[in-house]
Amino acid sequence: MNTTILFAGGAARWPIWEAPLRRALEESGIHADLTTSAAPETVDFIVYAPSGDIPADFTPFIRCRAVLSLWAGVERIASNTTLTQPLCRMVDPGLTQGMVEYVTGHVLRHHLGLDAILRSQNGRWNPVAPPLATKRPVGILGLGELGAACANTLATIGFPVMGWSRSEKTLQDVDCYHGDEGLSAVLRRAKIVVTLLPATTATENILDARRLALLQQGATIINPGRGSLIDDDALLGALNSGQVGHATLDVFRTEPLPIEHPFWSHPRVTVTPHIAADTRPETASRVIAENVRRGLAGEPLMHLVDREAGY
Ligand code: NDP
Ligand code: OXD
């Protein structure tokens, strides 16, 4: 029987993904019908993206062996009860590299005070050097694929790095914390906090007014995780009081961020339009192909989502 792979990543993505996917499938020795349209009962694998042509009801996909997400964050599909097949999220070396670059760039921007330097090209010689990275503790909430990679890079540069996760972890050169007390400890010490948690019921508003109040005066927040991790009103309050010195936000509860949202015009907020880390077709297609190969061979799939935990 033919293997059918339904690309449900959206019409706009198809021209970007078609060639790398075909190449990666061929390199893996998989002969499959890769298509953007197929009768549900003939589909073996679904390549999924949240903004694509996703079926809301997976029930008719009776032959489907797995849904393979092009996104790392799976909050928009993980709770779909009609999906009974395995769901795999995206772990892609290109995506990880992009996130490391985004986080490192924004951490260094705040650490070095680049905004103030750029603003002060006014003929006044003001030789104020920033402290070294060793004096600027960074807290990373979420020590998964992305959080751990960012933590390692920042530690290599010389930042004292603390990380926080659900389960207990050990990472070289990173002080690892878990549990509620652990979160408080990270927030109290960090001068820069990076949020790389998934959107789940357990992480909703994890940075609320009470937790933001634990931060050092003038701390920086960088959120490339998900908008739901931070209580927007509490963050605005903390920015207005100076408790939070600056927030760099890549993700929002509503995207695109509505034009009337106060984040757009707040002098202490930098908005980036969900561009922290894109899945890169060349590298990610190999991940998809390997999971298809495994699915066909009856081998364990990579990057399975824990549907109960939601990530
Ligand atoms: P992973 O699933 O690999 O890691 C998630 C981390 O969060 C794990 O360390 C996990 O803990 C921790 N975590 C989850 N729930 C809790 C909780 N309740 N309390 C404490 N820690 C928790 O995800 P990734 O690193 O691949 O991605 C993280 C998120 O980044 C994605 O879910 C997505 O929302 C976002 N993202 C944003 C992009 C952008 O462009 N802005 C691009 C890609 C991803 P444990 O290790 O114990 O399981
Ligand atoms: C993702 C994202 O989850 O782009 O991959 O946010």
Image (spheres, rainbow, N blue to C red):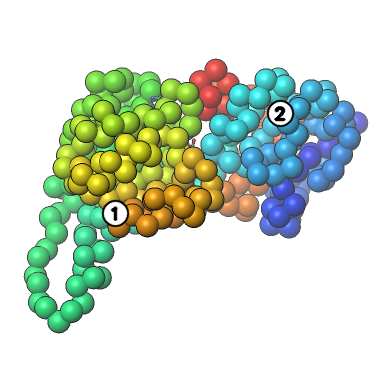
Q: Secondary structure at mark 2?
A: strand
Residue 109 is situated, as x and y percent measured from the top left of the image, at 28, 58
| Disc 2: CA contacts within 10 A as few (<14), some (14-19) or many (>=20) | many
Under mark 1, the amino acid is Arg
Residue 247 placement, left or right of 250: left
Q: Residue at x 79, y 40 (%)?
A: 6
Residue most extreme to the top:
308
Q: Which residue is mark 2?
A: 66
Task: Report ligand 1 position as a quadrant.
Answer: top left
Quadrant that contains the N terminus:
top right
Q: Is residue 103 visible?
A: no
Q: Nearer the viewer, mark 2 or mark 1?
A: 1
**Label 2 or label 1, whichever comes before in sequence order:** 2
Tags 2 and 1 touching, CB below 8 Å = no
Residue 207 is situated, as x and y percent measured from the top left of the image, at 33, 32
Q: Which residue is mark 1?
A: 268
